[in-house]
Image (cartoon, rainbow, N blue to C red):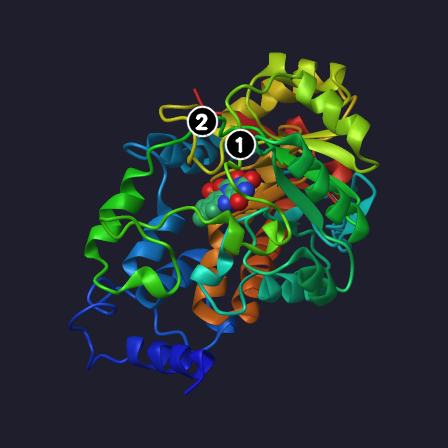
């Protein structure tokens, strides 16, 4: 039986009322949607609930975790409900165009797939399925440094260059090698992630690992407690690189790093993980070509501000000189609309497409985008915006 057959069987069993016993079905008993195809999903939450049945607890914890008590994670999602939309009437909305161009990349809608490391933890096709979905939907995919498939394989599956997410590493000669590889793969943009300089406490992930009784040593190097260890030597993007003493990030970096990066590459440099207006100004000063307002999906600083709340001051700091993208907590098309109304040029999703991936592979990843785009389109219709350019702060109201 192939792993895809096994997943199909699991999905079938998960939908069966007869099986509500032990893991993986126990959690979702009575609550999980009975989906037999991605097309049946009504919203991204149905795919989440199905995914939870299919993904083993340790991997589910890796996906869902924030840090400490997950306060920032919850804030990201909750922030969207603090804004309301102002509907407009008698605008001819018979043609609504969701397409846009971000730093030279033309996309069918402003919703993009964020970088997520190790996507094979959720489906054997991992990043390749995301690439195929991005190709089918004309979407932007940003590939993680910690991808479980190589950049070259993903680019082939996408049929066009992707953007590459770069972890700075603690050795510039390695950073340079990663940049050269991204250049050779035709990536137009590198998104350098700067919000994780020195560790984090992913408590929810650790808690769910306790529930996982599998032997994980076949896929991970594990420590004495069975917890996975970072093993860069085994990762596709670090093949041919001496990983001895190598770390993904470094606590000692300062803004000079961005200048250094700009000097070392022909790619456009987008900084992922900006939250403050002052940092947006510094990003422009140091030559960044774009910004992604992000707090790593609530996986970096705890008790942080929701990215939607950070967005306006970052937009002011950038002052129209470079595009500002955002991610974090986007679960509905109206969330996409609100972020654009507050000045974002494009909006990233992380966990939602991983739910789709876990549930149905490529078609699940596609369905997530399709649902968000359908909802986003209806928000545009209701607010009388016929194109992404027509979405403005006029159509959003902050509550109280
Ligand atoms: C499981 C997981 C792994 C992630 N891995 C990376 C990564 O390798 N590089 C990175 O820049 N961001 C990473 N992120 C952060 C996402 O790119 C994105 O900022 C975040 O998921 C957006 O929030 P959302 O999940 O609420 O949509 C990861 C997020 C998750 C949930």
Q: Residue at x 75, y 41 (%)?
A: 189
- Residue 181 position (above or below residue 53): above
Using residue 163 as the reference point, say whether residue 63 is left or right of it. Answer: left
Using residue 197 as the reference point, say whether residue 97 is left or right of it. Answer: right
Is residue 378 in sight in this rendering?
A: no
Residue 2 placement (x, y as % from top left): 45, 83
Residue wearing tag 1: 249
The mark found on residue 290 in the picture is none
Residue found at the very far left of the displayed protein: 21
Q: Residues within 10 Å of mark 2 (few under 14, many from 20)?
A: few
- Residue 168 position (above or below residue 281): below
CA separation, marks 1 and 2? 7 Å
Is residue 237 in sight in this rendering?
A: yes
> Count of labels shown?
2
Q: Residue at x 20, y 52 (%)?
A: 210
Task: Choose top left, top right, bottom left or bottom right for residue 260.
Answer: top right
Residue wearing tag 2: 198
Residue 142 placement (x, y as % from top left): 65, 48
- Which quadrant, please, contains the C terminus? top left
Using residue 324 as the reference point, say whether residue 310 is left or right of it. Answer: left
Q: Residue at x 59, y 66 (%)?
A: 129
- Residue 370 position (above or below residue 205): below
Residue 287 placement (x, y as % from top left): 77, 21
Foreground residue, 373 or 144?
A: 144
Q: Give the SS element for disc 1.
A: loop
Q: Residue at x 48, y 62 (%)?
A: 120
- Which quadrant, please, contains the N terminus? bottom left
Asked if the residue at tag 2 contacts the one at tag 1, i.e. Cβ–Cβ closer than 8 Å, the answer is: yes
């Amino acid at each position: 039986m192939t792993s895809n057959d096994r997943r199909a069987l699991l999905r079938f069993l998960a939908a069966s009322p007869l099986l509500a016993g032990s893991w993986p079905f126990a959690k979702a008993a009575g609550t999980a949607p009975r989906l037999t195809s991605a097309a049946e999903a009504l919203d991204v939450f149905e795919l989440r609930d199905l995914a939870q049945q299919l993904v083993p607890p340790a991997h589910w914890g890796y996906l869902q975790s924030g840090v400490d008590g997950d306060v920032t994670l919850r804030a990201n999602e909750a922030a969207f409900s603090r804004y309301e939309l102002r509907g407009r009437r008698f605008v001819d909305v018979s043609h609504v165009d969701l397409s846009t161009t971000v730093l030279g990349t033309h996309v069918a809608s402003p919703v993009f797939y964020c970088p997520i490391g190790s996507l094979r933890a959720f489906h054997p096709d991992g990043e390749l399925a995301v690439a195929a979905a991005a190709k089918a939907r004309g979407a932007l995919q940003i590939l993680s440094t910690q991808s479980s498939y190589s950049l070259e394989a993903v680019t082939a599956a996408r049929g066009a260059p992707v953007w590459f997410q770069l972890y700075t590493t603690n050795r510039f000669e390695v950073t340079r090698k990663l940049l050269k590889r991204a250049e050779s793969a035709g990536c137009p943009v590198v998104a350098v992630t700067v919000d994780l300089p020195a560790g984090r406490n992913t408590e929810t992930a650790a808690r769910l690992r306790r529930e996982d009784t599998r032997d994980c040593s076949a896929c991970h190097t594990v420590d004495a407690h069975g917890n996975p260890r970072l093993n860069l030597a085994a990762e596709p993007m670090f093949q041919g690189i001496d990983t001895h003493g190598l770390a993904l990030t470094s606590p000692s970096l300062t803004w000079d790093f961005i200048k250094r990066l700009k000097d070392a590459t022909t790619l456009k440099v987008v900084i992922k993980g900006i939250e403050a207006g002052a940092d947006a100004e510094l990003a422009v000063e140091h030559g960044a070509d774009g910004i992604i307002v992000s707090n790593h999906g609530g996986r970096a600083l705890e008790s942080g501000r929701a990215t939607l709340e950070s967005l306006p001051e970052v937009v002011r700091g950038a002052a129209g000189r470079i595009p500002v993208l955002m991610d974090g907590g986007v679960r509905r098309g109206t969330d996409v609309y609100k972020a654009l109304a507050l000045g974002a040029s494009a909006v990233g999703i992380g966990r939602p497409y991983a739910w789709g991936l876990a549930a149905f592979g490529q078609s699940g990843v596609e369905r997530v985008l399709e649902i968000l785009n359908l909802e986003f389109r209806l928000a545009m219709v209701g607010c009388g915006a016929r194109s992404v350019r027509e979405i403005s702060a006029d159509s959003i109201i902050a509550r109280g």
